[in-house]
Image (cartoon, rainbow, N blue to C red):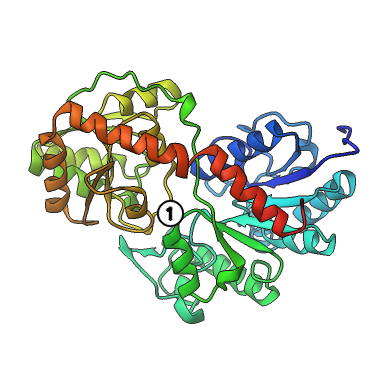
Amino acid sequence: MPEVEKSGKRLLAINNYFYRRGGAEAVFFDHMSMFGEIGWDVVPFAMRHDSNEASPWSDYFVSEIEYGRQTGLFRKAIQAASVIYSLEAQRNIRRLIEHTRPSIAHAHNVYHHLSPAIFSTLKSAAIPVVMTVHDLKLACPSYKMLRDGNVCEDCRDGKIYNVLRHRCVKDSVPLSAVVLAETMLHRLLGLYRDKVDRLVVPSRFYLEKLAEWGWPREKMVHIPNFVDVSTFRTDWQEGDYFVFAGRLALEKGLATLIRAVALSGERLIVAGTGPEEASLRQLAGELGADVTFAGYLSGEKLHRVIGESRALVLPSEWYENAPISLLETYALQRPVIGAAIGGIPEMVREGETGLLAASGKPEDLARALRAMAAHSPAARRRMGSEGRSWISSEFSAAAYRARTLDLYASLGVA
């Protein structure tokens, strides 16, 4: 068992996964690293998983839940109960806080694997609790306000029965029923509304959307995501292609992008894998679109394919929050073409750092692709430079740290 320092501030950092799985995990790990560098003791709490990074605190982590794996009926029942309210997570986090006595707890994604049951335990221990909102789970039981490829707000005004009515979770009645039961219990117990002191919201769009759905503004704080631009190269030689980087899922708008590529005659590299890959390959073939599927890329390989592109394209068709990939593209000194939906428009300065196109409209996205291609390489580089300069101040690690420390101080952690 690790020894605990007797002085200084201590951050309890909470997230389902303890490896870099996506944007939420990137923020989680970067947050921990940042606070460790300024002298805080950082103690993580997460789920056990084969891909986890090593941690001296892993004995406190909760048992793994992975829905894609084959399990027996009894095990599925246990998992369903844990999804709704995890007693194991409560027991483990109680032992952890008794040993560490954190100054503050900052949670990221907890639903389904850790469950918000932990917030009751933290509240009982008089530990201030902050949670970063990475998606729309607090309003929409199935996270995305998306149904059958279209934006859906049917659960507004408490009509959460629609998650089962529409089979919103993987088109499954049993899974949708579990999520409905989960949402009903969590709202009845006020696990998010009453046990979490502040919500950190990375985009102004999400803050406004949650306010529309009844979340009090005084409980929310807008703190944008961040990247450290000093860790990104900018000495790229531009190629002749556009790039998409991310998961190949329906809400990402890849079918619209492929149609736009076919209409514009431009070239596209797709970096990523996901459930829509086979159908997207077929669509590209049928349309004769110049699309290369590069598979999953990370680190230097991903930076290179973005850094040598004309621009990153984010053709999202759901309420995107504040994509880290967009910030990383600016850090690589490349412009962005983004869909005008969710939080994306507040991260693109039209004509200065990139271009916007109507979400779900291949013709308008083709227009944006042609317009970006018509610029000179020098003009595109200027756009990328403007983006890098912008995020160096507004979306910097220093700005994030200062805003987060101000938030913690407002909760008595000075």
Left or right for 88, reference 186: right
Q: Is residue 157 left or right of residue 12?
A: left
Residue 47 percent coordinates (x, y): 68, 44
User: Which of the 4 image quadrants contains residue 38?
Assistant: top right
Residue 250 drawn at (x, y percent): 32, 51
The residue closer to the viewer here, 411 or 59, is 411
**In terms of depth relative to the viewer, which is nearer, 332 or 361?**
332
Tell me what residue is drawn at x 91 percent, y 38 percent: 6
Residue 398 drawn at (x, y percent): 56, 39
Q: Which residue is mark 1?
A: 321
The residue under the point 64% across, 35% down is 34
Q: Residue at x 34, y 38 (%)?
A: 387
> What amino acid type should be assigned to the residue bearing mark 1?
Asn
The quadrant of the image that shows the N terminus is top right
Provide residue 412's location: percent of width, then percent of height. Answer: 77, 57
The answer to whether residue 357 of the structure is visible from this angle is yes
26 vs 101: above or below: above
Residue 242 visible in the displayed image: no
Position above or below: 308 against 98: above
> Circle 1 sits in a helix, a strand or a loop, which is it?
loop
Disc 1 residue crowd, few under 14, some 14–19, many 20+, Cα 10 Å: many
Relative height, residue 124 to residue 160 (above, below) = above
